[in-house]
């Protein structure tokens, strides 16, 4: 039985992040060796005080979230897919402003990684065949435990989530003892780490029944999270929707290496949809059944993980929540990445480089620095093949949420595919100084004898023996020496070699090539989670005008680069909107914006100008251009900035270039405000200081 | 039996395009009323002379295609997905240059349509639930006919394709009579229009057997082309991968209308993957099982299909292959779109406007004007609800290939979803001049009586009667008058109204709102087909240097906007590549390119500079920048243009801005060539005219 006296690591994480639907680690890593890792994790005993101010911040995010969700639905940033049909859990549709923001995030990601880091971007298919996902481990290990109502099979539950809920309910029961509180808390926090057997024991111990019917539940069983689909009309070729975009990169490593003139290191990127058939999707955009990933596999010589551009980033200070700190209940630390790599906290320069690039990217789209941290995976959390892994966690109403994983996955995936597809994915590096070594080989004569001895299988047996690695040949030779014969298995058939038949000799071989399977550093971005967190970070409500004011005036203060539209065009009223001069000026101004690559929208409705400003503040449009009666006379327009609500007055002919500079960041709003006649409230007159 | 004396319309199309895998119309339209259309089409008798020069052009494309395919694979523009596992038919992976070109095409599409036309772009899910695709008609009608080998069920064939192949083989038999030739040709060209019964008759008549085994074949049966996948762990919710992106737009019409301040007309766009489980995918990228669509639904008042910007495009001259010309074996005509709309050839201005915008888009990405035409659907090809439809066809090795469909689909889809989802998708327009009309209503007293009479169902019956449309109420009233009672069905239950119970009166009603379901114009782009045709149009091989020259020097002359990289950076040799000064200059130059948004690549391999120029010509990179020993001294570099192979010499500090202008088109290469010291071959010295 499990030891309930020790609290788990997850307890610490959960407590520290004060959320239920929160830091639960994503399945970015296949649950390889999950059983071992899970058991080990239970032995740890971290403590868990949550910083007070973090609690307050999260409460603020929680309060905002309700308004924000209402805003997102009303302005169609996103909503449940096929909503007119009642929707399906886990699927969302991005509406116009949401789609634009998401596209901007992806476009900035391409700029930061693909273009600036010279990555090779590919686009693979969403449907993948069985053999690929069998090799990657997803067919066998990409599972969650489920339980079913034994009398109503349409009722099923994710076992760990149901167990958590039952414990949560017990914790709310008045008058429980401290020992009970401790026990229930521990079980709740360990729920997703139990083995099948342990899970079933918990369900029996607490006599957990089907929630609505009270019927008995089945034993927990594994449910594969991939969406299956048959390929072709015969239905004989099993396909799945990819559970991650990374596998498509490994499949094409070989061809990308060719395009990179057969040189290491190099990175390959892919952006696209991934699909996971979650048993009980919830928490909005952050756990969808269909979601967008942006992944990079950066292939390196496993012995050379330094990065040529590390020097450019090493002085960057980041908040690092390293494994030791988590285990000893310390706070995250702030330190430079250079220090972290030199001290061995971060395994290598390439990993460190991508951690900084990730941070730069997240900040560039408008996330708040103080709410970004990097949490190292505990040794027990990592897949057995990974040597270090850091998650970029972003703070919001869900607590600290994993949004990016940056892992050193070693050579696991390439090796798995090379074996399964029987193709050589080794990197061959010409040695500057070739050297000689002694190797064991079958004698020529013995080869001929073997060919004769096994008749029609002869050639196959000979080639099989010749292709064995050195260690294997040494074993065979040793066994022949000691017992006189040795058996080899070829495609399930056994062949017995005898001492007289298989004769080996030692030869000198010149080694000119160093062959190895590249290691890989994998930065993996959950675009929808980043999108959801960005909305939380940029949302605020304007102060109420007086006590009776019931209106919530939401503002999304997007950075220009991620804003859905860079400006909104507003005719002062319907008289302007119908004026021929307006239409002419509008046409040429719109052309100019298009040429500058600045997206825009317009609002020609007959709402008051103040109401329309407020509407576009909700959309997060940074600038509003108003055409009024003066514009018709002297071609001057008013430009209003969203966050300050200040206005300037300038000639329309100057506006395109000014907007380009403001959006690009080469001129600040403060500076533009000084340069042109301006005012801070609508009631003032424009004036030049 | 089918009348073999008349040739079909498809014969004409096929003959005119001289391809087999070609003009076969895509299933962009659900095969609504397919049976009727197909039958009708057989009655037509067009003739079919193919222009001589078109044959030659197609032969040239055909010859190039082999080299082009080799280039595309070698340089990884694209290749079969999971190729290291042997691949799966119908799935492709875009490699780095292909992915970049495809992204550029999509980005130019967004610029041309979403930004310039103020469309609302959304992003819906790929997995859709059964009820949505049932309503759209895809569950019932999105089928192809299949036949199976009766003794080996792993062998199956698309019935029409197999029939075509059998006829093709018969046509190749020496010594067939003219009557036979005519018969086989006709059957071949009608193959995809046969009903299940007719298809089976053909298979029996020609005693068609399973190709490899010679076994008998099953009767043809329908195979649905959607990929099914279960949603959620219960497997009770049937899902499908969307067969087109359009449906996601219809589902969100209502919410997009709200964002457009409830005003018509407006357009909604979506770019993304669609999935069709083709029985026998072939013809490379042009018929994939997973492909990228970019679709627009432009919602209009069905009585106001004029377009405010039509005046800007009406003088555009296009090649139009209208239905009458097809039916009377005439050539396509060149005419202005204004003329075509005024003469009624193109149904309305909005359709005409999007035809021109489509043409502008295709030309802007680099397709050749002379190889783009617009073919009108024959009345028999169109879905019953469509009122006009034009395909943008692009000429290449497949003949004329449909790449974009621009259809007026009327209100079919919105009406279908409104009925299925039981939600109101009507557009309500406030009338400027409200009017009065007489309507029939249940008297207040009668309402109360009905409530009492039907007890617990009373409220439901009363509300049901009150909600009936006027025509229905008139029927009920008439029946009550004539027979004394009338039955109404509510959710499958019958209720009998009697004359005394249901009493109607006529009242005046003020009508202030005009309600209607919007019509829709749908431009639908097949991005992968456009990509494939673009490669064919921009490919050429440089002339051989002498007779013995076996090397093929392929060049992809992409427009800068669609080129995978805008420039390649080349150090003259390894000495330069390792020079610190080079690395410094490179770093700041790359930063500048990034800021300008110009993508670039570099080739630091030790191949000769000529070899490296050639390699990048293959990739279609328009400009090459060479750093040499002089660069180390005076910071001047050589800029080479891909198509002319001419070179200019200029200061590195001027290059970023020059490249921006050259790529944007604001300066021509000819002009830059004049402005700077230049040479036309490598052996010359740079000189200033």
Image (cartoon, coloured by chain):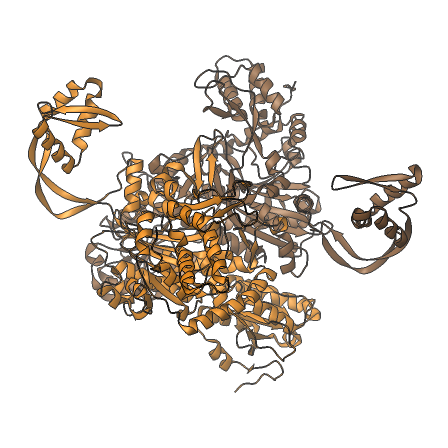
Chain colours: A orange, B brown
The answer to whether A37 appears left or right of B55 in the picture is: left
* In the displayed structure image, the side of residue A295 where residue A260 appears, left or right: left
The residue sitting at 67% across, 72% down in the picture is A608
Along the line of sight, the residue nearer the viewer: B508 or B172: B508
- Residue B360, position in %: x, y? 55, 50
Give the quarter of the image for residue A372.
bottom left
Report the label total.
0
The quarter holding residue B43 reads top right
Nearest the viewer among A89 and B367 is A89
Q: Nearer the viewer, residue A441 or A547?
A: A547
The picture places residue A15, in percent across and down from the top left corner, at 41, 64
At 54% across and 45% down in the image, what residue appears? A215
Q: Is residue A144 visible?
A: yes
Q: Quadrant of residue B640?
A: bottom left
**Residue B622 in view of the camera:** no
Where residue A205 appears, as percent x and y from the top left, is: 43, 50
**Horizontal and vertical percent for residue B433?**
82, 60
């Amino acid at each position: 039985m499990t030891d309930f006296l020790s609290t788990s690591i997850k307890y610490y994480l959960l407590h520290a992040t004060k959320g239920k639907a929160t830091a639960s680690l994503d399945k970015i890593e296949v649950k390889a060796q999950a059983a071992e890792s899970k058991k080990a994790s239970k032995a740890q005993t971290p403590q868990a005080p949550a910083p007070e101010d973090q609690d307050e911040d999260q409460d603020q995010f929680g309060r905002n979230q309700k308004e924000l969700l209402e805003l997102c639905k009303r302005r169609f940033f996103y909503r449940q897919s096929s909503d007119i049909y009642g929707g399906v859990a886990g699927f969302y549709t991005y509406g116009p402003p949401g789609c634009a923001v998401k596209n901007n995030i992806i476009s900035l990601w391409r700029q930061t990684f693909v273009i600036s880091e010279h990555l090779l971007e590919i686009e693979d298919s969403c449907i993948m065949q069985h053999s690929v996902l069998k090799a990657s481990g997803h067919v066998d290990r990409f599972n969650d435990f489920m339980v079913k109502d034994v009398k109503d099979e349409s009722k099923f539950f994710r076992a760990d989530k149901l167990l958590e809920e039952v414990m949560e309910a017990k914790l709310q029961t008045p008058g429980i003892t401290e020992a009970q509180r401790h026990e229930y808390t521990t079980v709740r926090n360990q729920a997703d780490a139990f083995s099948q057997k342990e899970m079933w024991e918990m369900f029996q111990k607490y006599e957990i029944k089907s929630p609505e019917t009270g019927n008995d539940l089945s034993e927990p069983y594994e449910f594969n999270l991939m969406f299956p689909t048959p390929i072709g009309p015969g239905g004989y070729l099993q396909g799945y929707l990819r559970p991650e975009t990374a596998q498509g990169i490994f499949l094409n490593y070989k061809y990308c290496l060719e395009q990179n003139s057969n040189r290491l290191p190099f990175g390959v990127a892919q952006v696209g949809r991934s699909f996971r058939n979650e048993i009980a999707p919830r928490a909005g955009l952050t756990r969808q059944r269909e979601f967008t990933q942006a992944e990079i596999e950066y292939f390196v010589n496993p012995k050379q993980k330094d990065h040529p551009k590390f020097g450019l980033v090493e002085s960057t200070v980041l908040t690092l929540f390293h494994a030791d700190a988590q285990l000893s209940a310390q706070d995250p630390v702030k330190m430079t990445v250079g220090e972290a790599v030199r001290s061995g906290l971060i395994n290598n320069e390439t990993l460190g480089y991508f951690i900084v690039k990730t941070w730069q990217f997240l900040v560039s789209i408008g996330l708040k620095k103080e709410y970004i941290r990097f949490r190292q995976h505990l040794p027990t959390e990592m897949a057995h093949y990974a040597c270090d892994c850091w998650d970029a966690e972003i703070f919001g109403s869900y607590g600290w949420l994993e949004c990016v994983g940056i892992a050193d996955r070693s050579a696991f995936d390439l090796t798995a595919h090379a074996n399964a597809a029987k193709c050589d994915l080794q990197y061959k590096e010409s040695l500057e100084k070739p050297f000689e070594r002694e190797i064991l080989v079958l004698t020529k004569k013995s080869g001929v004898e073997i060919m004769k001895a096994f008749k029609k299988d002869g050639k196959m047996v000979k080639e099989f023996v010749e292709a064995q690695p050195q260690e294997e040949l040494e074993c065979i030779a040793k066994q022949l020496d000691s017992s006189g014969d040795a058996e080899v298995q070829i495609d399930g058939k056994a062949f017995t070699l005898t001492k007289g038949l298989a004769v080996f000799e030692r030869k000198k071989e010149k080694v000119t090539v160093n062959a190895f399977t590249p290691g890989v550093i994998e930065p993996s971005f959950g675009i929808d989670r980043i999108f959801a967190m960005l909305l939380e970070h940029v949302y605020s409500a304007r102060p109420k005008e007086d006590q009776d004011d019931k209106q919530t005036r939401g503002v999304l203060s997007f950075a220009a680069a991620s804003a859905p539209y860079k400006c909104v065009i507003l005719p002062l009223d319907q008289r302007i909107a119908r004026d021929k001069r307006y239409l002419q000026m509008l046409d040429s101004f719109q052309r100019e914006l298009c040429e500058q690559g600045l997206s825009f929208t317009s609002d020609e409705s007959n709402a008051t100008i103040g109401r329309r400003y407020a509407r576009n503040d909700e959309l997060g449009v940074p600038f509003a251009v108003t055409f009024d009666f003066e514009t018709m006379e002297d071609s001057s327009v008013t430009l209003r900035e969203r966050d300050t609500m200040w206005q300037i007055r300038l000639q329309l002919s100057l506006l395109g270039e000014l907007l380009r500079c403001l959006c690009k960041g080469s001129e600040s709003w403060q500076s533009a405000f000084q340069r042109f006649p301006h005012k801070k409230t609508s009631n003032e007159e424009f004036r030049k200081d």
